[in-house]
Image (cartoon, rainbow, N blue to C red):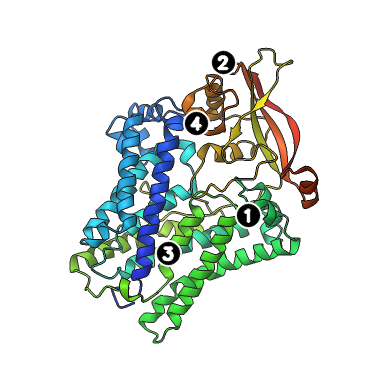
Amino acid sequence: MDGFAAVDFGFSREVLQRGIAVLYIVAFVSSWNQFPALLGEKGLLPAPRLLSWVHSRTRAGRILNPTLFRFVRFTDRRLRALCAAGVVIAAALALGIPQLGPAWVPMLCFLAIYLGYMSIVSIGQTFYGFGWEMLLLEAGFLAAFLGGREQAPPTVVIVLFWWLVFRLEFGAGMIKIRGGREWRDLTALTYHHETQPMPGPLSRQAHLLPRWFHQGEVLGNHVAQLVVPWFLFAPILGLVVPGPWPAIVGDVAAAIVIATQLWLIVTGNFAWLNWTTVVLAFSAVSAPVPFFRSAGALPIWWIVVTSAVFLLYAVLSWWPARNLLSRRQLMNASFNRWQLANAYGAFGTVTKERVEIVVEGTLDSDPDAATWVEYDFKGKPGDVRRLPPQVAPYHLRLDWLMWFLPLGGWRRLDEPWFEAFLGALLAADAPTLRLLARDPFHGERPQLVRAVAYRYRFTTHAEYRRDRVRWDRTRLGTVVGPARLR
């Protein structure tokens, strides 16, 4: 680093800008494909209904984060137009085209996709209530101030990225230490690979590893999240300490964060959470690659703008910093409507057993004599023979909420969206059926549907060799239905 200019972080800027842009493409494509069926004009939780409620109440607007649809009437067509525009702008950023111009060009492009995606998240209700939504928004906002290829990235903005990674990793580590006992007695990962929201192709193999390996995983996780993040700030010492060591320490810290995230990527499906963390961790990699090194001095106006952003974050960071020290630490919380300087964290407790809600339908009108057939989801476990798919960084929102559904107790499922989902299945609603992997009735309306709870567990190696099944499941009972269309 050299004062206001982080001259050795040109490569880091390339990874940050292009990587974040690619993740925005994934997010916009996900919304294009799923938002109309989940939250559109005829969706399970229609966004127009929420917006109408907000408009009808003077003070209700205070609970809604900024969205363009406060000023423009929502339609599915306009939602898709917004997604298409977001994909085009993000694709240009991923290719590095706006970065070839003055600093204000990529700034405006990143702010456009940040505000565009916030407009979607703000009306996404429970289907967009995930920590990686606010993480992507905050990353997009900060990326707006990394500048273009004409000058080196501003030092203050690189430091803000370190602060973001610190809050993300250290916050997750603290939420675990303060959370379930399983994180303190090193048993958490003897359950997690099996009970995580959406297992991947290698999750079963990871689950069947020896107990001592899982204990080592937990211990390594604590080191990576509670100790390593502090060393991300080591390159700052390069301003006063001569020699390569401050930069090397930062590189090693970044490498450890990236390595742990790659293990999570190959053993699970956490949408773009882990991929975003990998991209953000590159902010601490000081690689003086000549091709990415910019000799141009930072203009005064750009120093003023980026310094103002830094001062804004210095003020906003009071709340997440206090949260990190609080015994009642909040997880994935925002302290302002613009989703900046958020608190992060995940899996403060680990589920010990996996309960899946299996949705079934039948063409028979008599439930006692009916032949019931399961609906197959794209990501969540169902068929005991199917290899769990690799989905991330794509986000299957319906599948994720199906995992949350029984966590409060499978005997009573009281979620408005799930009731609407069953109604859509009874109506053979085409957009809803496209969210699934297979419609067993090929567009025909079932007479009845029901929801059945099962306890799932991964089979052992011996069980798989004998039965060729990856899951063993035990029926717990019917929790909804049989229900028919009114």
Spatial separation of the CA atoms under disc 3 and disc 2? 52 Å
- Left/right placement of residue 213 relative to residue 313 reads right
The residues tagged by marks 3 and 1 sit, at their Cα atoms, a distance apart of 23 Å
Query: Compared to 316, does 53 lie above or below?
Result: above
Residue 187 x/y as whole percent: 71, 58
Q: Is residue 130 visible?
A: yes
Q: Which mark is residue 434?
A: 4
Secondary element under disc 2, as helix, strand or loop, is loop
Indicate which disc residue 179 carries.
Answer: 1
Circle nearer the N terminus (4, 2): 4
Q: Reply above or below: 290 against 401.
A: below
Locate residue 421 relative to residue 370 in the image: left or right. Answer: left
Q: Secondary structure at mark 3?
A: helix
Write down the residue under mark 3.
Answer: 163
Residue 485's label in the rendered image is: 2
- In what quadrant of the picture does the C terminus appear? top right
Type of the residue with mark 4: Arg
Q: Secondary structure at mark 4?
A: loop
- Residue 439: image quadrant is top right
Q: Nearer the viewer, mark 3 or mark 2?
A: 2
Q: Earlier in the sequence, mark 4 or mark 3?
A: 3
Q: Residue at x 52, y 66 (%)?
A: 257
Q: Earlier in the sequence, mark 2 or mark 1?
A: 1
C-alpha gap between disc 4 and disc 2: 20 Å
